[in-house]
Image (cartoon, rainbow, N blue to C red):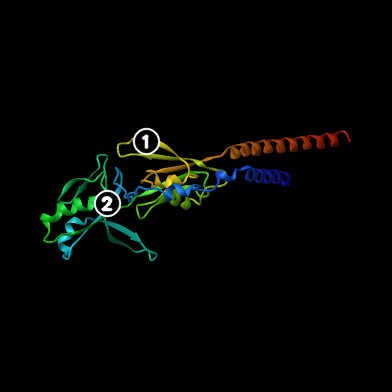
Amino acid sequence: MKLKSLILSCCVLLAVGCTSYKNVPYLQNPEVVNEYSETLPMYDAKIMPKDLLTITVNTTDPEAAAPFNLTVQTTMNMQTKSSYSQPALMTYLVDNEGVIEFPVLGRLKVGGLTKTEAETLIRDGLKPYLKEVPIVNVRMSNYKISVLGEVARPGTFNVSNEKVNIFEALAMAGDLTIWGMRDNVKLIREDAKGKREIIMLNLNDAEIVTCPYYYLQQNDILYVNPNKTKAKNSDIGQSTSLWLNATSILVSIASLLATIFR
């Protein structure tokens, strides 16, 4: 076991030593971005099919707004083992056509709209039914992204503020390991029509902060490819295990033969 640990430790040290420094730092040419002349638009997430929306309508008269704030009864079990019903706001599932069923207003096309645009659409629709202009708030309840591959903590992460960029997503996953290829990160994305695409990203290049894929959309997947050293070390690890097992068997056979012919 000591021999195996020593060999694996040497492999790690060799891998770190062989890794070119120029492939490690992020955003290596910041002057390109600092001299960028165009003003980049602020990112605002758009509502997609299968999004879950929480929509609240508020006025100075709660009873007037009540028909537009549908609730569902949920049963909660506390430590006292007593059960009771507590109302919770109903979420609206956006269908494949980008439509939700809203009280009184009926079918509303919200797919492709930003949060602000959806709020304006509902507010304008409610004006004939209320004496005052209501305050409408739309939130995406299931905004999430996934990070896989050569990162410290791969997984799926919820984003509460509906805005996350590539580096924030990687930070959630504990950043890349030493085996991760920073110039070969795949972004897997599906649009509102179901079309899927795989975009190659280079995190070494500072221009990534100006590209249209810098901010992630809901349900985006980042995959960090392992480098060649990781693949070689994986083969070395398997070969080492086989070699140690074979050696152990040979030693056992030799001991048995020595005992028999002693």
Instruction: Say what amino acid the circle numbered 1 marks.
Output: Arg
Earlier along the polypeptide chain: callout 1 or callout 2? 2
* Residue that numbered label 2 is attached to: 115
Determine the secondary structure under disc 2: helix
x then y, percent, for residue 151: 52, 47
**Crowd rating for badge 2 (residues with CA inside 10 Å; few <14, some 14–19, many 20+):** some
x then y, percent, for residue 176: 52, 47
Task: Say whether residue 256 is left or right of residue 128.
Answer: right
Q: Residue furthest right?
A: 262
Query: Which numbered dot is residue 196?
Result: 1
Which quadrant of the structure image shows residue 63? bottom left
249 vs 204: above or below: above
14 vs 57: above or below: above
x then y, percent, for residue 187: 43, 41
Q: Residue at x 68, y 38 (%)?
A: 240
Determine the secondary structure under disc 1: strand
Task: Out of 32 and 243, give the one closest to the viewer.
Answer: 32
Task: Out of 198 and 79, give the one closest to the viewer.
Answer: 198
Task: Say whether residue 157 is left or right of residue 111.
Answer: right
Task: Say whether residue 47 is left or right of residue 37.
Answer: left
Instruction: Say what amino acid the circle numbered 2 marks.
Output: Lys
Q: Residue at x 23, y 46 (%)?
A: 110
Q: CA distance from mark 1 to mark 2?
A: 24 Å
Task: Out of 90 and 144, give the one closest to the viewer.
Answer: 144
Task: Out of 41 and 119, give the one closest to the viewer.
Answer: 41
- The quarter of the image holding the N terminus is top right
x then y, percent, for residue 195: 34, 35
- The quarter of the image holding the C terminus is top right
Q: Are marks 1 and 2 in contact (CB under 8 Å)?
A: no
84 vs 29: above or below: below
